[in-house]
Amino acid sequence: MKKILIVNASKRRNGNSYAMEKRFGELFDGKADVKVLRLGESAVNACLACDACKRKTTPNCIQKDDFTALIPEIDSCDGMLILSPVYWDQFPAQLKAFLDRTYSFMDFTQPDFSMAGRKNKKIAGFFFAGFGPADVYTSMAETNLKNFAVAGFTDVKAHVTGNVNAPASAMDDENALKAAEETAQWLLA
């Protein structure tokens, strides 16, 4: 059974990311071992840039927070799904901190700069933009997801649903629901 890590980057419990988290839970039910990290309810500190992780041979961090505890899950999963709103044309701060902490996977002595135990994993991002068309944000989403390659996630798929400012309104968007099904199948394949 595939191991899927869902990272929900929203603080809005009744918003699109939480609604879609529930939908993906249904799509993965019985097909994957799923672990969820809700960044809005977790302690994920900013990277200290101390380079203590560079003196290790496996991903590690000296900070003792929810990210550090999750490092083995990140390293061993088959795929990761990020659910996130778009803030000011970018990732929200809590997701940026999560991304920055994957620096703990970086190994400058490796050709791919990664000390991840598992490589060539899949990462999918499902993003929700309150205003504006989705295509405006797609390149931002893809570019940021590619940065997770240092943690072994090299196969990238991004979806952005636009004009979904009302809480859970993405659940009324047939294209978003179809994209969720396709994304779940892609992560499970």
Image (spheres, rainbow, N blue to C red):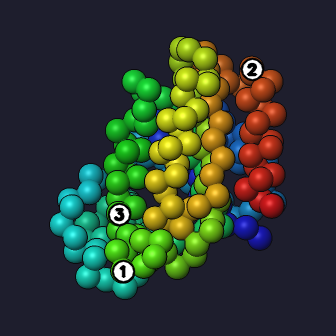
Q: Is residue 8 visible?
A: no
| Mark 2 Cα shell of 10 Å, populated few (<14), some (14-19), many (≥20) | few
Q: Amino acid at mark 1?
A: Thr
Query: In the figure, is residue 113 to the left or right of 188?
Result: left
Q: Amino acid at mark 3?
A: Tyr
Q: Looking at the rendering, which quadrant does residue 52 occupy?
A: bottom left
User: Is disc 2 placed on a helix, strand or loop?
Assistant: helix
| Mark 3 Cα shell of 10 Å, populated few (<14), some (14-19), many (≥20) | many
Nearest to viewer (mark 2 / mark 3): 3
Question: Which numbered dot is residue 172?
Answer: 2
Figure check: 55 above or below 149: below
Question: Which numbered dot is residue 109?
Answer: 1
Rounded to the nearest whole Å, what is the CA distance between mark 2 and mark 1? 48 Å
Figure check: 118 above or below 49: below
Nearer the observer, 148 or 184: 148
Q: Looking at the rendering, which quadrant does residue 41 occupy?
A: top left
Q: Position of residue 96 (x, y in %)?
A: 37, 45
Residue drawn at the location 34% of the way across and 49% of the way down: 97
User: Is disc 1 placed on a helix, strand or loop?
Assistant: loop
Residue drawn at the location 50% of the way across and 35% of the way down: 140
Question: Which numbered dot is residue 33?
Answer: none
Q: Position of residue 147 (x, y in %)?
A: 46, 54
Question: Which numbered dot is residue 103?
Answer: 3
